[in-house]
Image: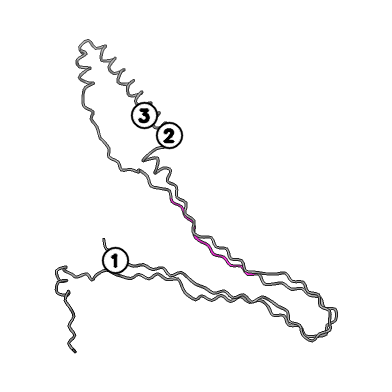
Amino acid sequence: METLLKITTIPMEYELKIHRARLEYSSSKSQLITDRIKGGLTIKNRPIQLHLDTYDARNSVCPTTMESVRQAAAKGKSDALEATATYAKEGAMLLDPNITLDQIFSQRAQQPTGEFGLRFLPTTGPDIEWSDPDLSMQYQMDKLSFDIKVANGNFEFIPGNVELSITQMPDVNIEYIGKPLYVPPSAASYFNHTPVDILA
């Protein structure tokens, strides 16, 4: 079968610029004691999570050993109860002097009757669970503490800055690459011809 659609996924692109905080000092004779606690950018990305449980679906097609033993035990118990009921019924029939063994044998040889079910495998589908994706960003600026003993000079504190620019937005391009469809289909024969340049 010919492919009719071409689907192209364009992911998001972004540019991240981090300018650290800084302290500028000029023309001073003071004694400066600084203490810096470095900050930073933390990005936590949790992609989508898919939990697929196919235990019940596989057991309906090819059961495990434990499930096969459980099913065989249940069927054996059911067959034993059915055989007990049949023998009890036949024993009650033997007490009747008007019933012969031929009647009991003919009853045993009867064709089975009832509804015969048709089912498709697997009888149940997989258990599917999923969680949404998550993206979190946390920026902690640099922390500065300083002690000036002689305040002669000029101090300028320039705080940190974070620039986040998205250079490309996410997009999905769907392009039809199949041949033209004509209605009715027989009209296609009128359009399949070689183009003629009338200006030549």
Describe the colour scheme in one phrase.
one colour
Mark 3: which amino acid?
A: Lys
Q: Name the residue under label 2.
A: 65
At label 2, the amino acid type is Thr
Q: Is residue 85 magenta?
A: no
Give the Cα distance between marks 3 and 2: 15 Å
Discs 3/2, front: 2
Highlighted magenta segment, given as a residue range: 128-139
Q: Give the residue at x 17% y 74%.
A: 192
Q: Vertically, is 182 above or below 88? A: below
Q: In the figure, residue 94 lies in which quadrant? A: top left
- Relative height, residue 53 to residue 103 (above, below): below
Q: Mark 3 points at which residue?
A: 75
Q: Quadrant of the N terminus?
A: bottom left
How far from the left and from the top, in percent, is residue 87?
Answer: 30, 18
State whether the magenta stretch is mostly helix, strand or loop: strand
- Residue extending farthest to the top is 97
Q: Earlier in the sequence, mark 3 or mark 2?
A: 2
Judge left or right: residue 171 versus residue 87: right
Neighbor class of circle 2 (other Cα within 10 Å; few <14, some 14-19, many 20+) is few
Find numbered disc 1 in the image and state the secondary structure of the residue it sits on. loop
Residue at the spot of label 1: 4
As drawn, is 198 to the left or to the right of 8?
A: left
> What residue do we see at 64% from left, 77% from top?
19
In the rendered view, tell whether residue 104 sits above or below residue 175.
above
